[in-house]
Amino acid sequence: MTTLLAVDVGNTNTVLGVFRDDELAAHWRIQSIAGRTSDEYAVLIKTLLDMEGVPWRSVTAGIISSVVPPTVFGLQRFFKKLCGQPALVVGPGIKTGMPILYENPREVGADRIVNAVAAFEEIRAGCIVVDFGTATTWDVINPKGEYMGGVITPGIQISAEALYEHAAKLPRVELLRPGKVVARNTIASMQAGLVYGYAGMVDALVDRIRAEVEFPATCIATGGLAPLIARETRTIEATDELLTLKGLKILYHRNQS
């Protein structure tokens, strides 16, 4: 039985998932720390596995996607100790099964490719993936399964922090849905701007993408803040917080000879 540990390192959070015979047995979200050592990964991941009753030594393989390059070194040392071999890393040279139509394919973040592969595998038609991470991204895949490109904006958390850091009288706020758009206190006003403002931006960009491409495009959302924003939109048709982990599993199997 193959037990695969999939790791997606984002700028803010790292998502880990354990697949046992293609079934997702457990998943976690931890803070991304660029200088974390292999020993620190070992202690942390062993603790997470123990919590879910997954035997530590049952992990036989790994796959990593990372937009924080310094994290790969510590993770690879961890995988070499645990599995006796390095993990597969999503990057140039990996078999994705998806042509990349970007002007420079190397510029496309690993997480964006992983999400695109997972979404197309699930939908098997033209689609748009909106990923609510440190940055919010829109990735477009055509009906032939080709990655066409997309859009990048500051993420909602970055925008919230920018308000706090650059406006002297505005507080740091929790990202929650306020009751009304026309709020009657500062915190609710900021929450309304962030939540409803981002929902409006999502709809506007999806509308523009659909008008620009020549095919119907299903819109799916992922990322930690996807459930908060997606429910306020009219264009997002599905939400899958585990899309990236599913994509990593698909890419692992596509690269086994």
Image: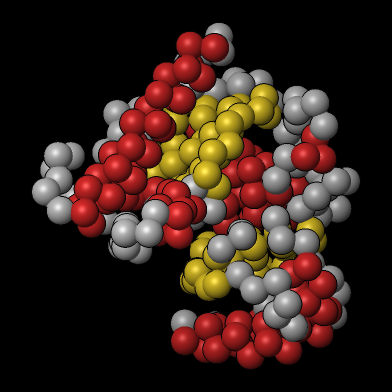
Q: Is residue 115 left or right of residue 204?
A: right
- Give the position of the N terminus as an image quadrant: bottom right
The answer to which quarter of the image holds residue 68 is: bottom right
Q: Is residue 190 left or right of residue 135?
A: left
Q: Is residue 46 left or right of residue 174?
A: right
- Observer-nearest of 110 and 197: 197
The colour scheme is secondary structure
Q: Answer whether residue 161 is visible to the viewer in this image.
A: no
* Residue 161, position as x, y percentages in the image: 44, 58
Q: Is residue 133 left or right of residue 235?
A: right
Image point (64%, 49%), residue name: 111
Image point (14%, 39%), residue name: 182
* Residue 62, position as x, y percentages in the image: 72, 68
Q: Is residue 246 above or below residue 84?
A: above
Image point (29%, 42%), residue name: 193
- Observer-nearest of 26 and 203: 203
Farthest-out residue, front? 168
Q: Answer whether residue 13 is visible to the viewer in this image.
A: yes
* Residue 49, position as x, y percentages in the image: 55, 83
Report how many numbered discs are placed on residues in the image: 0
Q: Is residue 176 above or below residue 239?
A: below
Image point (45%, 25%), residue name: 206
* Residue 165, position as x, y percentages in the image: 45, 59
Q: Is residue 191 above or below residue 164?
A: above
